[in-house]
């Protein structure tokens, strides 16, 4: 017997049977998304915490003392904050300076080697140089006194120059300037020319009779770079003995000027020559400003010749120095 097409259909007949949700389904529906959200929140909080380490200087210290990857994020944040708009407070924090010096001592004393340890030591030296308090100096002086002829010694010497400048700008000074000068002077005998080069720069910043004596000795160094830096240090201190080496620096001639295509080595040599000559011109300028006297005739002749140099920066610097000399002579 046929079913009438007009017979109404029960809605329940078209639906699958209803079953209670399984435990696995509930886990997928609620627990897994909850875990993902929790992870995202934790990551955000971690970055938020790292980004705000500067609110607590001791947080830097605690993190840097841990031998894990987190110390590098703390180092980056500290570097940014020291040079940031609110860095003056950190740079004047005596406790922070002392703690960073202690971390540097501990890292050196640990005997650890390798790239990461060396990088941390270099970073700590440079960070200490950014301070404006004398308490940042002792750890640097200890590194210089070790005279290990390694990058840490060089970084400590360079950091002392930066620190000396910062202290002077803040109307402060080293607790014992003689100890700082003595440490750098002792290191001028290093077998590493880069270390001796750093000594020349730093002695020029530190100043004083003992520094001048050390710079005069470095003027006889076998390394051209060391002699040049010593001359610039003497010029910074107003010592006309610098003219002897400044004359050598000004006499450097350009090379392969007529070649249209230059290899990397030649380009590097030309760049270095330009840098040396420009620095020599700056040295002459410092001496003229300090002594208020014109340089020797031979120096003037060399500078006038540089007014036609193929390097634009050398030409412009030479022209400026000659104008300054003319004003004094006139």
Image (spheres, rainbow, N blue to C red):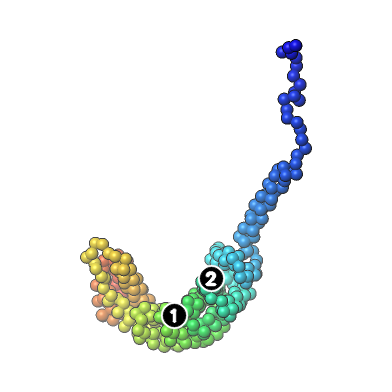
Q: Position of residue 9 (x, y in %)?
A: 74, 19
289 with respect to 172 (left or right)? left
Q: Is residue 328 above or below residue 183?
A: above
Quadrant of image for the C terminus = bottom left
Q: Quadrant of residue 194?
A: bottom left
Q: Position of residue 115 (x, y in %)?
A: 51, 71
Mark nearer the N terminus (2 vs 1): 2
Quadrant of image for the N terminus = top right
Neighbour tally class for label 2: few under 14, some 14-19, many 20 plus, Cα within 10 Å: few
Which residue is denoted by mark 1 in the rendering? 195
* Residue at (51, 85) in percent of width and height: 145
Q: Secondary structure at mark 1?
A: helix
* Residue at (36, 76) in percent of width and height: 283
Q: Which of the two residues, 329 or 124, is positioned nearer the viewer here?
A: 124
Q: Secondary structure at mark 2?
A: helix
Q: Is residue 199 above or below residue 320?
A: below
Q: Residue furthest front?
A: 1
Which residue is denoted by mark 2 in the rendering? 116
């Amino acid at each position: 017997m046929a079913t009438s097409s007009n017979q109404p259909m029960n809605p329940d007949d078209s639906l699958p049977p209803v079953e209670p949700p399984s435990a696995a389904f509930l886990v997928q529906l609620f627990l897994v998304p909850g875990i993902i959200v929790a992870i995202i929140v934790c990551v955000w909080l971690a970055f938020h915490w790292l980004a705000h380490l500067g609110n607590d200087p001791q947080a830097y210290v605690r993190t840097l003392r841990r031998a894990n990857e987190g110390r590098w994020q703390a180092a980056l944040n500290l570097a940014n904050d020291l040079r940031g708009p609110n860095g003056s407070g950190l740079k004047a924090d005596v406790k922070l300076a002392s703690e960073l010096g202690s971390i540097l001592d501990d890292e050196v004393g640990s005997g650890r080697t390798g790239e990461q340890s060396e990088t941390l030591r270099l970073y700590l030296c440079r960070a200490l140089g950014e301070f404006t308090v004398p308490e940042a100096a002792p750890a640097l002086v200890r590194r210089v006194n070790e005279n290990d002829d390694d990058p840490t010694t060089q970084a400590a010497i360079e950091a002392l120059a930066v620190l000396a400048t910062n202290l002077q700008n803040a109307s402060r000074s080293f607790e014992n300037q003689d100890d700082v000068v003595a440490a750098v002077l002792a290191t001028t005998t290093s077998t590493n020319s880069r270390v001796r080069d750093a000594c020349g720069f730093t002695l020029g910043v530190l100043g004083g009779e003992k520094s001048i004596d050390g710079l005069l000795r470095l003027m006889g160094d076998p390394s051209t770079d060391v002699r040049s830096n010593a001359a610039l240090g003497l010029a910074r201190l107003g010592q006309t003995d610098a003219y002897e080496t400044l004359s050598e620096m000004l006499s450097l001639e350009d090379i392969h000027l007529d070649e249209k295509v230059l290899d990397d080595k030649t380009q590097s040599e030309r760049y270095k020559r330009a840098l040396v000559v420009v620095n020599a011109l700056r040295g002459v300028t410092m001496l003229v400003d300090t002594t208020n006297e014109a340089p020797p005739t031979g120096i003037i002749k060399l500078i006038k010749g540089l007014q036609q140099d193929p390097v634009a920066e050398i030409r412009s610097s030479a022209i400026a120095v000659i104008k300054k000399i003319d004003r004094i002579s006139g």
